[in-house]
Amino acid sequence: MEVLSLFPRYLLKGSLSEALLADLQNLARQVAANPEASPNAAAKLAGQLFQQRELRPDQPAVLELCRDVILPGCERWIRHVIDKQPPQGRGPWVPGRYGLQMIDLWLNVQRQGDYNPTHTHGGSFSGVLFLQVPPQINAESFDGQLCFHGPEEWHIQSFRTGMAEYVLPVPGDFYVFPAWQPHSVAPFRGAGERWSIAFNVVAVPQAPRPAPPGPQLPEPARPAVAPSAVNVSLSSVRPRPGGF
């Protein structure tokens, strides 16, 4: 006999290098010590947290994070999911036919009693990476854990056990998931602060270029993830997609 997983939802999990984690922790300390120097993101976010501050794309650690970790992570998710489909069913999601762009990235500072209610994000992909976790947040309770919610209510008595998946935050771990995936963060008790960085990414199909006259040669594949700062735009005044 074999137990099969029906209609799975995919999350991408990874770990930062120790050097990048240290750089982001230093950046978070600077932002937390002088919050007025960074735009306040709380008004457009669901979280009921002590601080939620936007980060800038010109900060070296942010640029490295976006270029080397987050955008390649979104690309890895796309290839894992889309490549399972027949070629004629993949739509524009083939390499070279779309681009990935970071649109929002912010620091969350959670203290005792703070929480993030169940919510979704705008854009195509969202995610979180953990920078600092108080020791009382552990696997023995729900306190401070990230929860991913399924399409139906969790109810263990009727074996609806796949409707809630709890993730224990560990410094350096990160997760990438579709922006429509509902998630929440439980409050925790005791001293200390839980630091995380959250983000939104859009995947944008690109219009096909008109073919020049004459014989055609195979077009070289264009990278789906550009290795420059062009794909990082964290403007707080741009039109916002719904659901955020």
Image (spheres, rainbow, N blue to C red):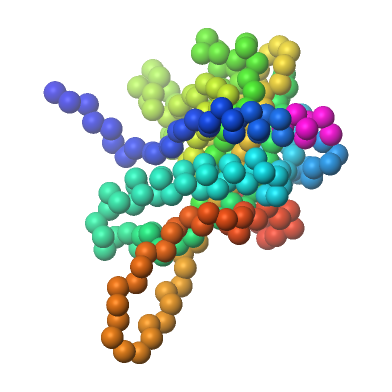
Residue under the point 84% across and 34% down: 34
In the image, taking residue 144 as reference, residue 14 lies left or right, namely: left
Toward the viewer: 113 or 124? 124
Residue under the point 60% across and 59% down: 230
Toward the viewer: 70 or 5? 70
Toward the viewer: 87 or 166? 87
Give the extent of the magenta segment.
28-34
Work out which residue is located at the far front of the displayed protein and give it.
19
Image height of 174 relative to 218, above or below: above
Residue under the point 55% across and 13% down: 138
Residue under the point 38% across and 86% down: 212
Q: Main secondary structure of the magenta part?
A: helix
Q: Position of residue 229 (x, y in %)?
A: 61, 55
Give yes or no for residue 153 being in the magenta stretch. no
Q: Position of residue 47 (x, y in %)?
A: 68, 35
Q: Position of residue 168 (x, y in %)?
A: 52, 21
Q: Position of residue 131 (x, y in %)?
A: 63, 27
Toward which corner of the image does residue 33 lie, by quadrant? top right
In the image, taking residue 112 as reference, residue 139 lies left or right, namely: left
Does residue 92 appear in this view?
no
Give yes or no for residue 29 being in the magenta stretch. yes
In the image, taking residue 13 as reference, residue 25 lies left or right, namely: right
Position of the N terminus, as image quadrant, is: top left
Image height of 163 relative to 144, above or below: below
